[in-house]
Each structure stands twice: as C-alpha cells, then as structure tokens.
Image: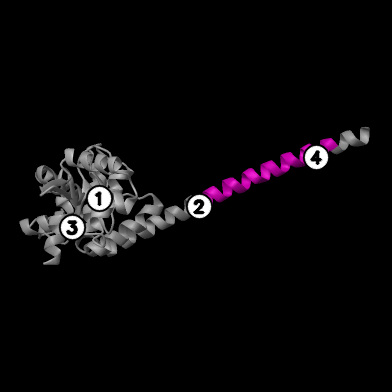
C-alpha cells in the first residue's frame, strides 16, 4: 500500500510540473504572437506611409489596404484623431461619403420605399459631381467606388440608423429603413432580380407561387407587405396585377437600353 501511495504522489507532482510547463508555453506563445502582431503593425504603418497617395486616391488600392488591416484589428476608419486618422484621413473621407450616401437614400425613399442599388447611389453622386478632399491634399477627388459606398454604409449602421446593405441576386442594395425583411421578402426580391422568369424588376403573384412553390395566400401576403412599405409599385391592368421594384426596374431598364 505504501508503494501505491508513493506512486500517486509522484503522479500528482508530475501533473503539476506538466501544468506549469504548459502555462509557460502558453505565456511564451502569447508573448511571441503579440510581438509578431506589433511587428506587422509597424510594417503596415510603413506601407501606409509609402503608399499614402494610392490609398487616398485609388479605390481598389484602398479596399485592398483595408483588407490588410482587418486581420490585425487595425481600423483606420475609427481612428480619426489618432495616428491613422492624422496620417491617412480616410476615416473623415468615409464619414463625409456616408453623409452624401444617406442624403441620396433619404431623398429617394418616397420612390423606392427605402431600398436602392449601391450602383444607383454611385451614379447619382457622380451626376452631382460629388468630390472629397483629404486634409493634406490640394485637390478634391471623385475617385470612390461601390466598395467605398458599402464601407460608408457600415459606418452608418453603427449609429443604429437602420442603414445596411443586402445582397439581392446579383446586386447589392442599401436599405435605409429599420424594418427587417424576412426570408419570404428576400426570396420575392431575388425572383424580381432574376430576369429568366419574366421582366426584370417585376413579378406577379402567379410568378411567385409558380417559381417558389408557395400557395396564393403566402405569395399575396409577402407582396402586400412590400407594397405597404413602398418597396414595390402595383400596376393593375385588365384584371392582371404586376408588382414593380423601382429600385431594380428603373436601373435595370436603363442598363438594357
């Protein structure tokens, strides 16, 4: 029995040694990881300084730079007064862009019910000649992309304003109303965006039931809710009812002319 007790004692001591060693390894690994991240942040800052002009004036390059920042937890958009804000000024750029995007969305809400294509917002801003100037730049630039607009909407969404982006078929839309769109509404919108089943940006209750396999009540309920929110227009002609999405149909029609 005494021999067994010594065995148990040695086992406990060994477990304690292993636990201590494991903790040392974890501490060492964490310190090493933090050191690596710090080195990468320094490299990122050097990269930003070297390519500052491209980051500010080339939308594609700017998007790639933001992708590089994300894994390191660096957010140049929220650091308006810190190192990144003073060096790049892109936080202020996205703030100004978000204001212009919000203006377009709100001005068009009575027409489209608070849902609009990102591409249409960009076209409207371009037609207006909207330009932005970085703090250390002598000239204004109109070089901003649809990705920039999507990023600016993310800044708006953090304010709890109801602004967000959704993917409808092949296009990205901005929603500027707080109402949530459930799966049924999204399926109807995806169907309207898919012109293989009919005219682009338009559906009928019969289309919805036939393609999605819903009964008439479910199809009508989804369409009536979208109609009530102003996101679709109803065209009743000789007993036939067609539902048009102005945010899709107008833009789609223009693109096909």
Q: Residue 177 placed where, x, y %?
A: 20, 39
Q: Any mark on residue 206, and which?
A: 1
Q: How many marks?
A: 4
Query: How dense is the environment of label 4, judged by Cα within 10 Å: few (below 14), some, or many (20 and up)?
Result: few
- Rendered location of residue 18, percent (x, y): 71, 44
Q: Which mark is residue 240?
A: none
Do tag 2 and tag 1 residues touch (Cβ < 8 Å)? no
Magenta span main SS: helix
Marks 4 and 2: which is nearer the front? 4
Contact between marks 1 and 3 (CB within 8 A): the answer is no
Badge 3 crowding class, 10 Å Cα cut-off, few under 14, some 14 to 19, many 20 or more, is some
Image quadrant containing the C terminus = bottom left
Residues rendered magenta in the picture: 8-32
Q: CA distance from mark 2 to mark 3?
A: 41 Å
Q: CA distance from mark 3 to mark 4?
A: 68 Å
Residue in view at x 29 percent, y 47 percent: 186
Q: CA distance from mark 4 to mark 2?
A: 32 Å
Q: Secondary structure at mark 4?
A: helix
The mark closer to the camera, 1 or 3, is 1
Disc 4 marks which residue?
11
Left or right, 13 with reference to 99: right
Given this view, does label 2 or label 3 mark the residue nearer the observer? 3
Residue 109 lies within the magenta run: no
Kindly identify which numbered label has been placed on residue 119: 3
Counting residues from the start of the chain, the first of labels 2 and 3 encountered is 2
- Residue linked to disc 2: 33
């Amino acid at each position: 029995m005494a021999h067994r007790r010594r065995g148990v004692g040695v086992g406990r001591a060994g477990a304690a040694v292993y636990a201590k060693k494991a903790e040392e390894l974890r501490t060492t690994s964490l310190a090493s990881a933090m050191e690596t991240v710090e080195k990468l942040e320094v490299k990122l800052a050097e990269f930003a300084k070297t390519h500052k002009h491209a980051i500010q004036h080339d939308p594609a390059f700017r998007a790639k730079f933001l992708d590089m920042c994300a894994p390191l937890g660096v957010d140049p958009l929220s650091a308006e007064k810190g190192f990144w804000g003073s060096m790049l000024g892109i936080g202020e750029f996205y703030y100004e862009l978000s204001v212009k995007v919000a203006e377009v969305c709100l001005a068009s809400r009575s027409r489209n019910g608070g849902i609009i294509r990102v591409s249409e917002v960009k076209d409207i801003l371009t037609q207006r000649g909207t330009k932005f100037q970085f703090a250390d730049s002598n000239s204004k630039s109109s070089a901003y992309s649809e990705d920039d607009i999507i990023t600016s909407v993310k800044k708006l969404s953090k304010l709890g304003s109801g602004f967000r982006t959704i993917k409808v078929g092949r296009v990205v839309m901005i929603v500027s109303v707080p109402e949530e769109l459930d799966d049924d509404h999204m399926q109807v919108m995806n169907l309207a965006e898919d012109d293989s089943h009919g005219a682009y940006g338009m559906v009928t209750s019969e289309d919805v039931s036939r393609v999605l396999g819903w009964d008439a009540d479910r199809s009508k309920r989804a369409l009536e809710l979208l109609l009530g929110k102003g996101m679709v227009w109803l065209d009743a002609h000789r007993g036939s009812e067609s539902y048009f999405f102005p945010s899709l149909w107008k833009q789609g029609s223009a693109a096909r002319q």
